[in-house]
Image: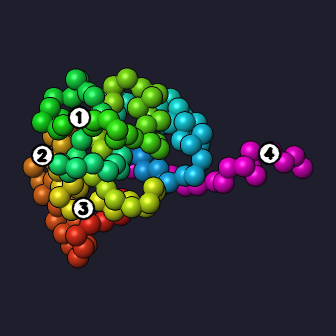
Amino acid sequence: MSHSHNQDKYKSIEIPIIGGESWVSVTVPPSENPIAYNVLARAIVEHIPAKSWITIAPGSFYGHTIAKLESQKHASASEVPELQPPHFVTGIAAAVNRCTSDVLCLVVNAEGQSGYERVDADALADVSYVIGSAMNFGAEYSKNVAKAVRRSESNSIYV
């Protein structure tokens, strides 16, 4: 019976992948291993045929609810301010951003320990509006997201 060193080093996780007619959603749980994000991002980009990507990352900044990493290609996010230094993106969003050129990286204002950030309802409503516009989901999409967040009976939600 052979035993791989990587089996000890990296735990197995299930990653939910759901899709629609013109989109695929991949939800990656937090990891303490930054190398795992890079390996996983490469595999996702190689195996999921996408023309463009949208990533959502938590961040901490002031003055607005969402920001974006520099993106000239995505007109749907033209109103979204760019993330300014010293603020940054880590995790799977940063890894996917590094693996492909056509990516819109949206950063939602969040607070808390890395991997367990709470995002306020307004930030989720704003980011759902941008995603809905980019994906041509229609106005009902962002309304439904806002309704679901408000039903959580909290001013914020873990994402």
Circles 4 and 3, Cβ within 8 Å, touching? The answer is no
Q: Does the CB distance between marks 2 and 1 fall below 8 Å?
A: no
Q: Quarter of the image for the C terminus: give it.
A: bottom left
* For residue 100, above or below residue 26: above
Per the image, label 2 sits on a secondary structure element best described as loop
Q: Secondary structure at mark 1?
A: loop
Residue under the image location 48 percent in, 54 percent down: 29
The residue wearing badge 2 is: 138
Res. 24 visible in picture: no
Check disc 3 and report its element: helix, strand or loop: strand
Residue toward you, 60 or 8: 60
Residue visible at 45% across and 55% down in the picture: 114
* Colour mapping: rainbow
Magenta residues span: 1-18
Pointer 4 or 2: first along the chain: 4
The answer to whether residue 60 is left or right of residue 127 is: right
Point 45% across, 28% down: residue: 98
Label 2 or label 3, whichever comes before in sequence order: 3
**Which residue has dot 4 on it?**
5
Crowdedness of circle 3 by 10 Å Cα count: few (<14), some, many (20+)? many
N-terminal label among 3 and 1: 1
